Image (tube, grey):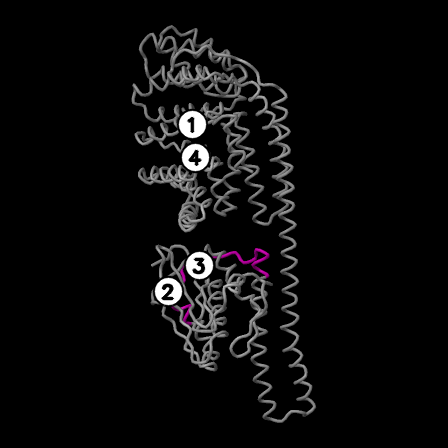
């Protein structure tokens, strides 16, 4: 939903001041604009008059409540600046006047004209930072007027000016890639994403700016099926940046950083950064849409973490704030002055005088839009409910399958154990028979022990009780230890068990999780390999991603079996080469633990030619 609110934020405006906004709380004065006007009239020197306006707190709520008085004061200062040839002051005053015309008076034609004048001053001053931000605002006006081609042009100009500016400014990359995705123009979205990445990399930007730029690119990559490998690389980069992030260099980025955290699954960080937005003291009332975004992100993050009570609490706050934002949108849309005729639009684009037309949108259109949005909310609630029902049905099916596995696989060995204990008590077994029965029971009990270990581990993972604790792990030593625990089975079945992992290889992962993964893959390989076969554990790298492979020369499997290999309850249990029982739970557990450690599990196989399981992880440690 917060992707939808991203677009709604543009309807209400970008809300990002081009100059630093005052930290003075709005409650500290009840008539600041009147006091400012009196001070302006009191000073006699032209430069002092201009400084009175430029040094005043900017864009506080009272200025929005008295926009006419604010614009009048700025006009007086602009007249002086232009008369005295003060280009820099003229630029700053025009920017502020355009901002108020756009977001307070909703007169976008006039705002367009003022921004266009400001752009000519900024280019004269070679103030490329202001050029970039002015072009971004011109693009916002074009988007409000549904002139998407012009919007893309101005955002492209903003990006061009950014290349010459020392000031970091990411919004044109963010919204260009967002709207290109909305228009299904994936090639253009990719191009903008790559520009954002090179933009922050070339400037050695702070970690929060890099995380944002990478996040914009990742949002595009994950929508393209053949770009998933690159998407995972950037996801890893983003996670690493977020883990190292100690401070946000620009507090206006807090909500965007929270969105990126949610996108890459760092839900606790998303909650932390989104919560910081509510502590800001310099947020005027028109930034309500940012708060709505944050309520929604916090609710979604708590839901992902399994804290449904907190999720519901923030979802209620989100709904309350969202309804207010919808009312504001209806008000903005009904009051916004629009550019109607093609000729007028062309005149504006050439920075010429415009004979403005004013009209209010039909109230019924606003009401219809409001009803449609509410209908969309209802539909989203319905879809979420259906998704939860499907997940619950799947969990119930999994539970039933697990109970069936446990009851079937535990009943037989425990019954045999009970019968043999009874026969032993009665003296009904000879010594050779007793020895044979003990051996069989030992194998059965080993199977039961392994089944219980896997079941308990899997249940913990489903209850979110097995959060990974990554640390550097010596892969060779860990694999060697697991091979030693499986040597009895290997010797019994006359199977060669080999560790080909180089010494010194280290991997960032949860050591206990990795032990469970390797143990289950070795047991699975030994189970389905014939006497005289081999099982090899090896290591290699795909790009910068380390891989551990467990390869056997066993029975292999057909494609239809391979397709359901990692889904509990799909397909029938398989028997090993020595008639060993199999439930499939071990491989399901390996897959879940691998993904919990930001890795992937894959398998390749061919009947009669063996099977290879591959664990792929993030960047290794050397």
Query: What is the magenta range?
Result: 459-480
Q: Which residue is mark 4?
A: 174
Labels 3 and 4: the sequence-earlier one: 4
Quarter holding residue 54: top left
* Secondary structure under the numbered disc 4 in the rendered image: helix
Pick whichever, 6 or 349, lies toward us.
349
Q: Earlier in the sequence, mark 3 or mark 2?
A: 3
> Which residue is the site of mark 3?
509
Q: Earlier in the sequence, mark 1 or mark 3?
A: 1
Q: Is residue 469 magenta?
A: yes
Using the numbered discs, state the Cα–Cα distance from disc 1 to disc 2 in whole angstroms. Answer: 51 Å
Q: Which residue is mark 1?
A: 149
Give the class, few, some or many, for how many residues have Cα within 10 Å of label 1's Cα (few <14, many ≥20). few
Which mark lies nearer to you, 4 or 1? 1
Secondary structure beneath dot 3 equals strand
**Tag 1 near tag 2, CB within 8 Å:** no
Q: Tag 2's secondary structure?
A: strand
User: In the rendered structure, are the residues bearing label 3 and label 2 in contact, judged by CB atoms less than 8 Å apart?
Assistant: no
- Kindly report the distance in space between the C-alpha atoms of the residues bearing marks 1 and 3: 48 Å
Q: Split into 4 quadrants, where in the image is the N terminus?
A: top right
Mark found first going from the N terminus, 4 or 2: 4
Above-or-below relation of 136 to 620: above
Picture disc at residue 539: 2
Which type of secondary structure does the marked residue at label 1 adopt? helix
């Amino acid at each position: 939903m917060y992707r939808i609110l991203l677009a709604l934020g543009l309807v209400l405006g970008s809300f990002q001041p081009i100059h630093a906004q005052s930290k003075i709380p709005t409650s500290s004065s009840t008539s600041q604009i009147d006091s400012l006007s009196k001070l302006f009239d009191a000073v006699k020197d032209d430069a002092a008059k201009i400084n009175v306006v430029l040094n005043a707190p900017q864009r506080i709520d009272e200025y929005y409540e008295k926009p006419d008085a604010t614009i009048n004061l700025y006009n007086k200062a602009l007249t002086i600046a232009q008369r005295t040839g003060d280009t820099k002051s003229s630029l700053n005053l025009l920017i502020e006047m355009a901002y108020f015309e756009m977001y307070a008076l909703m007169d976008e034609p006039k705002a367009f004209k003022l921004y266009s004048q400001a752009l000519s001053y900024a280019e004269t001053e070679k103030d490329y930072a202001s050029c970039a931000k002015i072009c971004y605002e011109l693009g916002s006006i074009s988007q409000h007027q549904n002139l998407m081609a012009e919007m893309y042009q101005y955002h492209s100009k903003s990006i061009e000016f950014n290349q010459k500016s020392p000031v970091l400014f990411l919004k044109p990359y963010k919204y260009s890639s967002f709207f290109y995705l909305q228009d299904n123009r994936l090639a253009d979205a990719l191009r903008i994403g790559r520009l954002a990445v090179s933009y922050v990399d070339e400037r050695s930007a702070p970690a929060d700016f890099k995380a944002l730029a990478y996040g914009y690119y990742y949002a595009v990559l994950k929508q393209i099926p053949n770009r998933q490998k690159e998407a995972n690389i950037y996801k890893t980069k983003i996670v690493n940046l977020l883990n190292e992030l100690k401070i946000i260099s620009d507090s206006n980025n807090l909500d965007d950083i929270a969105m990126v955290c949610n996108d890459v699954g760092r839900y606790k960080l998303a909650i932390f950064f989104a919560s910081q937005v509510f502590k800001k003291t310099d947020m005027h009332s028109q930034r309500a849409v940012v708060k709505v975004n944050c309520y929604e992100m916090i609710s979604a993050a708590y839901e992902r973490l399994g804290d449904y009570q907190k999720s519901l609490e923030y979802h209620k706050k989100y709904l309350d704030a969202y309804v207010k934002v919808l009312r504001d949108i209806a008000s903005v849309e009904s009051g916004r002055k629009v550019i109607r005729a093609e000729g007028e639009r062309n005149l504006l684009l050439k920075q010429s005088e415009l004979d403005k037309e004013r009209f209010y949108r039909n109230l019924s259109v606003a009401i219809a839009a409001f009803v449609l949005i509410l209908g969309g909310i209802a539909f989203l609630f319905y879809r979420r409910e259906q998704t939860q029902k499907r997940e619950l049905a799947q969990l119930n099916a999994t539970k039933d399958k697990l109970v069936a596995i446990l009851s079937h696989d535990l009943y037989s060995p425990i019954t045999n154990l009970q019968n043999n204990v009874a026969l032993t008590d009665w003296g009904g077994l000879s010594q050779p028979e007793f020895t044979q029965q003990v051996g069989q029971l030992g194998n059965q009990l080993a199977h039961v022990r392994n089944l219980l270990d896997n079941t308990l581990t899997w249940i913990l993972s489903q209850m979110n009780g097995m959060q990974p604790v990554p640390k550097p792990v010596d892969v060779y030593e860990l694999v060697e230890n697991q091979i030693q625990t499986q040597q009895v089975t290997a010797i019994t079945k006359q199977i060669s068990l080999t560790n080909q992992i180089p010494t010194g290889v280290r991997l960032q992962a949860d050591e206990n999780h990795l032990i469970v993964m390797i143990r289950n893959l070795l047991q699975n390989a030994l189970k389905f390999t014939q006497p005289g076969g081999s099982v090899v554990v090896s290591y290699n790298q795909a790009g910068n991603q380390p891989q551990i492979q467990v390869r056997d020369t066993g029975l292999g499997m057909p494609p239809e079996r391979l397709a359901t290999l990692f889904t509990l309850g799909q397909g029938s249990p398989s028997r090993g080469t020595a008639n060993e029982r199999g439930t499939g739970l071990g491989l399901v557990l390996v897959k879940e633990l691998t993904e919990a450690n930001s890795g992937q599990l894959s398998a390749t196989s061919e009947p009669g030619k063996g099977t290879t399981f591959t664990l792929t992880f993030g960047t290794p440690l050397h």
